[in-house]
């Protein structure tokens, strides 16, 4: 590998390279594409919505051009979506430019010959997503509670001290309705749930299931160099991050094996400035079942990498937590209005499903047929079996059902019933699944139906992709394997800019290659008005990289009090169009104002949102990639060829060096 010194040059004169004019009407994955994957640019003329003030009439011929030399490497015609109709969900008239057959690694842009305009830059190479995956997993490091964010692990601007170690905080956390010192517990550690500093056991369930299955289904993609404090310990960093949360859940488990449900209290910026007292809620059935599930699945994964002592501890805790929940089937705690924020108490159906999935993971872990007996007696109560309808809001439940089918001792008839129900729903009998891809239902190639654009639609999008990928994970409907992979890839590209907002739904991703990324989102650390962390390009640093906001939500509204009791609040006068008054997919805005604007309904990030995305994206990453913290391989890595190109926005001259590592080119 040839070493070349990187020279940083600054120049205001634009040189050859990249389009003269870049437009957001041409939508591409701003990170790029793997060579052999499906590649479709979406060209849009906005008919309705906030961005319809300028019409765009695309030419008939489009090109792929080399970013540095402007050489034309591929030419083809565009095709109108749905005969030229305007899609209701997006408010756009759309054309597709397919360049799947072009596979040569490099840096490119899409060019409209007639209009003399181009797209943002993108890469084609096998490792194009690996650094993006790293950034999205590092979100969990930044959301860690009870640990400093210190150099060299924290990026510049995001160093912070240990949070929630003060008076009556997590080292001395007390019961919400009895603050006597006799109730004090050390409940430190774990992840802050979302944009607040609360920690919910039940909300950790989908996040941990997704991360643990992301590792199990593709273990070779996960490396030990994500620049977290545990990096270099011979354990894949995804499991190190999972262990940080599991260690907190261990503290949440009492001597009777039940699990405490929730910790709440406080909000400040940065995390370490929060001095509010912290309180915990009582143990519940659902929280204990959450522990049973994630301890059991965690035990399987840690045993697989040789961490047998830790795995044995998790196994013992999983068995006891499940037994406690079965002996205490109706212990609930409704925290809303009393402690923390979101209501963490699960409904009866969801609690029952955690019994079911816990039985599956415990049977896989222990081989004890008592768990199989319970599973076989109750699996038909799952909505997948009752409705034969695979559904993104049932992600963890469907994962548990599918997991059972791969256990060697699983009952044959039960296995067949589950796989048939899932396969038929994904393949033919649900228009939202494979038929949505083959019929090109969504102009932006990432279909979920109107009713599924709710609070946290970005998680729903990633879950839908994971449902497609599960078809190939379990080798179901092999004839359509390529279609399931391609259908899932549409959701990856949607998250990376192929959407009506041309928005990469990850925060502060410029150094990772994105041009139009999330610049602000709801989070107590990166709060509205912060001189340091509010907004990229306005405050000194903006928010940390890699956070995923909730996403488009057509149900968003300011607090109802703006029409009455709180009408004099400054936020009530804020223009929120968008996200209000828009086509569904345009019901989004980068903003982070708190009450009464309630931006959290659109932009609050969450551990479960990032986890679903991490699981999805990992299937599109490659092994053996050279990744780095400061200069990602997607657009800024060193190479053996020195290239100069201007930033199309700032005019600053950039230097690009290429490295050729075997047959793989890194840029």
Image: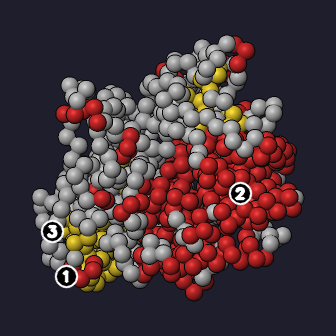
Q: Are marks 2 and 1 in contact (CB under 8 Å)?
A: no
Residue 182 is labelled as none
Which residue bears the numbered disc 1? Answer: 60
Q: Which residue is mark 3?
A: 56
Side (left or right) of 566 relative to 659: left
Q: State the CA–CA distance, disc 2 to disc 1.
A: 54 Å
Q: Residue at x 15, y 60 (%)?
A: 52
Where residue 279 appears, x then y in whole percent? 60, 23
How far across and down, in percent of the image, does residue 348 sit?
Answer: 62, 49
Disc 2 vs disc 3: which is toward the camera?
2
Q: Is residue 10 above or below residue 486?
A: above
To which residue does mark 2 refer?
356
Q: Earlier in the sequence, mark 2 or mark 3?
A: 3
Q: CA distance from mark 2 to mark 3?
A: 52 Å
As helix, strand or loop, the secondary structure at mark 2 comes to: helix
Looking at the picture, how far across and down is residue 23, in whole percent? 21, 62
């Amino acid at each position: 590998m040839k070493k070349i010194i990187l020279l940083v040059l600054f120049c205001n004169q634009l040189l050859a390279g990249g389009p003269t004019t870049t437009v957001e009407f041409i939508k591409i994955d701003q990170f790029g594409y793997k060579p052999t994957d499906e590649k479709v640019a979406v060209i849009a003329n906005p008919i309705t919505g906030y961005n319809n003030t300028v019409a765009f009439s695309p030419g008939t011929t489009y090109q792929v051009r080399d970013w540095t030399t402007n050489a034309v490497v591929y030419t083809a015609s565009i095709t109108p979506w749905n005969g030229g109709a305007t899609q209701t969900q997006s408010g756009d008239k759309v054309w597709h430019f397919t360049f799947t057959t072009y596979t040569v690694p490099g840096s490119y842009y899409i060019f409209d010959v007639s209009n003399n305009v181009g797209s943002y830059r993108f890469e084609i190479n096998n490792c194009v997503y690996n650094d993006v995956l790293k950034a999205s997993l590092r979100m969990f490091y930044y959301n860690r509670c009870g640990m400093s964010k210190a150099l060299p692990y924290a990026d510049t601007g995001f160093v912070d001290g240990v949070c929630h170690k003060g008076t009556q905080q997590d080292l001395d956390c007390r019961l919400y309705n009895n603050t006597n010192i006799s109730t004090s517990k050390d409940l430190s550690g774990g992840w802050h749930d979302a944009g607040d500093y609360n920690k919910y056991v039940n909300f950790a369930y989908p996040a941990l299931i997704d991360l643990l299955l992301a590792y199990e289904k593709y273990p070779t993609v996960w490396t030990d160099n994500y620049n977290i404090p545990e990096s270099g310990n011979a354990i894949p960093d995804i499991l190190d991050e999972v262990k940080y949360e599991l260690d907190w859940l261990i503290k949440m488990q009492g001597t009777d094996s039940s699990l405490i449900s929730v910790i709440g209290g406080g909000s400040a910026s940065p995390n370490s400035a929060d001095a509010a007292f912290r309180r915990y809620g009582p143990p519940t059935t659902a929280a204990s079942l959450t522990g049973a599930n994630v301890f059991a699945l965690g035990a399987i994964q840690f045993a697989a990498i040789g961490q047998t002592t830790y795995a044995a501890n998790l196994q013992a805790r999983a068995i006891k937590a499940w037994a406690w929940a079965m002996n205490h089937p109706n212990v609930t705690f409704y925290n809303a209005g009393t402690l923390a924020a979101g209501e963490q108490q699960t409904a009866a159906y969801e609690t029952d499903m955690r019994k079911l999935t816990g039985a599956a993971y415990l049977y896989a872990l222990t081989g004890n047929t008592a768990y199989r007996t319970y599973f076989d007696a109750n699996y038909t109560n799952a909505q997948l079996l009752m409705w034969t309808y695979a559904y993104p809001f049932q992600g963890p439940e469907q994962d548990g059902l599918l997991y059972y089918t791969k256990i060697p001792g699983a009952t044959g008839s039960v296995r067949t019933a589950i796989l048939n129900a899932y396969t038929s729903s994904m393949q033919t009998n649900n228009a939202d699944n494979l038929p949505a891809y083959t019929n090109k239902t969504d102009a932006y190639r990432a279909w979920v139906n109107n009713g599924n654009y709710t609070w946290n639609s970005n998680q729903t999008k990633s879950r839908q992709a994971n449902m497609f990928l599960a078809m190939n994970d379990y080798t179901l409907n092999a004839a359509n394997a390529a279609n399931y992979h391609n259908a899932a890839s549409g959701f990856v590209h949607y998250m990376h800019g192929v959407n009506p907002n041309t928005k990469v739904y990850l925060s502060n991703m410029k150094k990772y290659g994105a041009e139009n990324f999330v610049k602000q989102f709801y989070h107590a650390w990166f709060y509205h008005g912060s001189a340091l962390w509010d907004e990229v390009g306005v405050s000194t640093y903006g928010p940390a990289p890699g956070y995923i906001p909730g996403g488009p939500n057509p149900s968003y509204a300011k607090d109802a009090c703006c029409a009455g009791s709180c009408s004099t609040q400054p936020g009530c006068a804020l223009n929120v169009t968008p996200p209000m008054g828009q086509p569904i997919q345009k019901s989004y805005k980068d903003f982070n104002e708190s009450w009464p604007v309630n931006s959290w309904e659109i932009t609050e990030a969450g551990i479960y949102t990032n986890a679903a995305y991490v699981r999805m994206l990992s299937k599109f990453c490659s092994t053996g990639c050279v990744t780095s913290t400061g200069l990602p391989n997607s657009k800024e890595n060193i190479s053996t060829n020195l290239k100069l190109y201007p930033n199309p926005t700032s005019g600053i001259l950039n230097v690009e060096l290429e490295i050729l590592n075997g047959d793989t080119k890194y840029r």
